[in-house]
């Protein structure tokens, strides 16, 4: 890997710490609450559809997810669901916002080794408040220059990010678990990306083709980053 | 006003464009929906209490506001409210997120005159997605280096902002309509602030004492900024 990098950006959810399993757990609870109305599979599909439809309005993160659960509940029940269920849905959301922050293996060691050699930033989608909470609780805050909570992670968003960081694409390395959000747009604007897969990925973040690109790397574990950078 | 400023930050809501009147309108609709249960005044108080209680969890912005309306609805009705009302509450939120962006008088002229002479940023609380939407629709995006959506606007948050902008407090001028969020913390960390009052202020943003400080200015209209800076 060439080392013209000035900034190394880390995705947060399922790159620094566990996230998707908490959403899966929340969805299980939602489906259990609503099991009188539809099968688990149909409820999951209905919730996913509502989320995707609301995405342009709500953006990413827990609060939009909870609002979509509320909407799915009255829609699939044709307004017969009780407000006790609404209360439980609000409760599922509040629980999600109070989940412990569990670091992924190797993260802290890796950040320790990179710290001082590069400007490290967190570049993530999701809920502004919740991402700041998680970074704070993670104890990793001191390794990072700052956190960027992005509205989207598309090419234009990365271009804005680089402009704001006052660097060129060749100075930028992105590390994350989503090929769609952390890898493809970064490669497309001339940056470099390392994919560190996580065992579960939200359907919206999946892509169905392979990536072959000279600036694309894969690592089984984030610990391999230091070796890739030949530190 | 001394001019050691490098960055001029503008609050967004009710400084660049109208916001609070839209929330007041939403609250009126909520109170009308729930008028079977409590008086308008009691409903407003209950909603405000729920918002404040949820603030550490939800943060600022529309989505947290809607979640607090849902919660207030089932709480004040002792779970007797219908899910049709829940649907209408979700609708009030979606309407809020689609409101037109109405610039305050003098903003664009002022930005035109400051642009190129200072790094201009937007420094605002609120919902990440919605603030980006509004800035985009405002047509003011090109005047600003970037937008900072802050989790809070307290001293520590401004200190982080300055660190991130790589400037000292004497290089920082903040302009906004909230004495609590745009003025006091900025003065306390050694920056300069101009208060441009808006005709209505959310209860949570009000303070009950006068401010006397050598770095504190007041303007009836944002157009006076140019004069204060002696451009």
Image: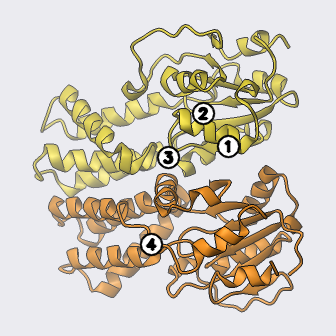
Chain colours: A orange, B yellow
Q: Chain of mark 1?
A: B
Between marks 1 and 4 in the image, the one whose residue lies nearer the viewer: 4
- What residue would you read off at disc 2? B12
Quadrant (top left/top right/bottom left/bottom right) for the N terminus of chain B: top right
- What residue would you read off at disc 1? B147
- What residue would you read off at disc 4? A102
Local crowd at mark 2 within 10 Å, few (<14), some, or many (≥20)? Answer: many
Question: Disc 1 to disc 3, how far (Cα)?
Answer: 18 Å
Question: Disc 2 to disc 4, how far (Cα)?
Answer: 35 Å
Q: On the same chain: label 1 and label 2?
A: yes
Q: Chain of mark 4?
A: A
- What residue would you read off at disc 3? B97
Q: Look at 69% across and 41% down and name the residue there.
A: B163
Question: Disc 1 to disc 4, how far (Cα)?
Answer: 30 Å
The answer to which of marks 1 and 2 sits earlier in the sequence is 2
The answer to which of marks 1 and 3 sits earlier in the sequence is 3
Give whichever of B8, B33 is nearer the camera: B8
């Amino acid at each position: 890997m060439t080392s013209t990098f000035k900034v190394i950006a880390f995705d947060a959810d399922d790159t620094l710490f566990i996230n998707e399993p908490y959403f899966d757990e929340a969805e299980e609870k939602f489906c259990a609450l609503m099991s009188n109305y539809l099968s688990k599979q149909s409820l999951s599909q209905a919730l996913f559809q509502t989320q995707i439809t609301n995405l342009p309005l709500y953006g990413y993160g827990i609060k939009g997810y909870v609002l979509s659960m509320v909407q799915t509940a009255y829609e699939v029940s044709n307004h017969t669901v009780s407000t006790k269920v609404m209360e439980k849905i609000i409760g599922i959301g509040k629980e999600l916002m109070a989940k412990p922050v569990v670091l992924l293996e190797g993260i802290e060691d890796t950040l320790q080794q990179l710290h001082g050699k590069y400007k490290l930033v967190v570049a993530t989608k999701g809920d502004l408040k919740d991402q700041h909470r998680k970074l704070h609780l993670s104890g990793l805050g001191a390794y990072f220059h700052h956190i960027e909570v992005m509205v989207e992670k598309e090419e234009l968003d990365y271009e804005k990010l680089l402009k704001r960081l006052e660097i060129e694409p060749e100075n930028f390395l992105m590390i994350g678990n989503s090929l769609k959000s952390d890898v493809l747009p970064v490669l497309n604007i001339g940056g470099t990306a390392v994919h560190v897969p996580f065992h579960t990925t939200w359907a919206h973040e999946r892509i169905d083709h392979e990536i072959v690109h000279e600036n694309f790397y894969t690592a089984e574990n984030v610990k391999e980053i230091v070796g890739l950078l030949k530190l």
